[in-house]
């Protein structure tokens, strides 16, 4: 167990999630009562470090949850906007489900939700997965075994520090230079993230981080993101105690649609849907 600053602050407030071993012991009310005090003492680096540790601690649990095993329909819409063999950056790739879906037609039927119809088998993309957790990559990279030629680069890194990740796998030295040596060039046909980028982006970082990633998009490149729209009464950030992995607490961010539009427009992007 690694006690991050967030966990230490919770402990100082008398909340000890690391001791919760069963669902019955998980106490979200305790977390809620000290949330504002704890979050006010954390930097974005603290938040990033904590979420990375929390996800790394629960790889097996994350992979086994049915809700995480299937792709979302938005991915189909995104793929339809990308030319065949286009190059995609999959940010916060997690257990590599979406990366696999984009490169391997044979995997798609098993990853579809009930209402989804797989793209044509001829529609295959090339993908650069970016994931902060080495544990996720070690656990899941085997999914690419028969299609590794469509994965020119895998980056282990924090999406809030664009261009500063580490090479986990590479068959393309130029792409490795671009994405790990902070030497961005417009080489991407698209950037995709299923929730991870938005729900774990620290407040105040969305605009500047998106502007940097957008430098790697070709002209008319596509940025596809899903996120939780912050409604009235919701806080900017939420400490959420996991019931499926007792003891784990993650930090989630909520943005309004106007905040998202403003951040993306400031990056030179135009809303199409």
Image (cartoon, rainbow, N blue to C red):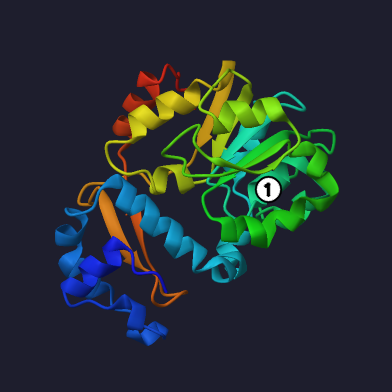
Check disc 1 and report its element: helix, strand or loop: loop
Q: Quadrant of residue 76?
A: top right
Q: Which residue is found at the position 70% from the left and 29% from the top?
A: 173
Q: Where residue 189 sits in the image (x, y, percent)?
A: 64, 23
Q: Where residue 206 sits in the image (x, y, percent)?
A: 35, 34
Q: Which residue is found at the position 68% from the left and 58% from the top?
A: 140
Q: Which residue is found at the position 30% from the left and 46% from the top?
A: 44
Quadrant that contains the N terminus: bottom left
Front-lying residue, 163 or 214: 163
47 left or right, relative to 161: left
Numbered marks: total: 1
- Is residue 163 visible to us here? yes
200 left or right, relative to 238: right
Tag 1 residue: 116
40 left or right, relative to 217: left
80 left or right, relative to 180: right
Front-lying residue, 77 or 35: 35
Q: Quadrant of residue 13?
A: bottom left
Q: Where residue 70 sits in the image (x, y, percent)?
A: 64, 56
Q: Quadrant of residue 264?
A: top left
In the image, is residue 114 above or below residue 98?
A: below
Q: Where residue 25 sits in the image (x, y, percent)?
A: 34, 85
């Amino acid at each position: 167990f690694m006690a991050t600053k967030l966990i230490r602050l919770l402990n100082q407030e008398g909340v000890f999630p690391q001791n919760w071993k069963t669902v019955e012991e998980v106490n979200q009310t305790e977390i809620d009562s000290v949330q504002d005090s704890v979050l006010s003492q954390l930097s974005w680096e603290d938040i990033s470090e904590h979420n990375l540790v929390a996800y790394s601690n629960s790889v097996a649990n994350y992979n086994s949850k049915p809700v995480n095993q299937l792709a979302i329909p938005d991915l189909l819409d995104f793929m339809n906007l990308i030319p065949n063999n286009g190059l995609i950056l999959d940010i916060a790739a997690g257990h590599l489900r979406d990366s696999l879906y984009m490169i391997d037609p044979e995997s798609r039927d098993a990853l579809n939700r009930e209402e989804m119809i797989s793209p044509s088998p001829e529609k295959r993309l090339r993908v650069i997965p970016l994931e902060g957790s080495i544990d996720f990559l070690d656990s899941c990279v085997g999914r690419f075994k028969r299609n590794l030629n469509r994965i020119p680069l895998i980056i282990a890194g924090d999406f809030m520090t664009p261009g500063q990740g580490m090479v986990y796998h590479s068959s393309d030295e130029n792409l490795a230079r671009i994405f790990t040596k902070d030497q961005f060039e417009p080489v991407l046909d698209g950037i995709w993230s299923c929730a991870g980028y938005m729900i774990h982006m620290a407040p105040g970082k969305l605009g500047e981080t998106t502007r940097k990633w957008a430098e790697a998009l070709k002209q008319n490149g596509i940025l596809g993101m899903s996120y939780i729209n912050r409604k009235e009464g919701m806080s900017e950030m939420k400490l959420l105690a996991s019931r499926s992995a007792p003891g784990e607490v993650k930090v989630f961010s909520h943005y309004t649609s106007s905040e998202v539009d403003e951040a993306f427009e400031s990056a030179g992007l135009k809303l199409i849907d």
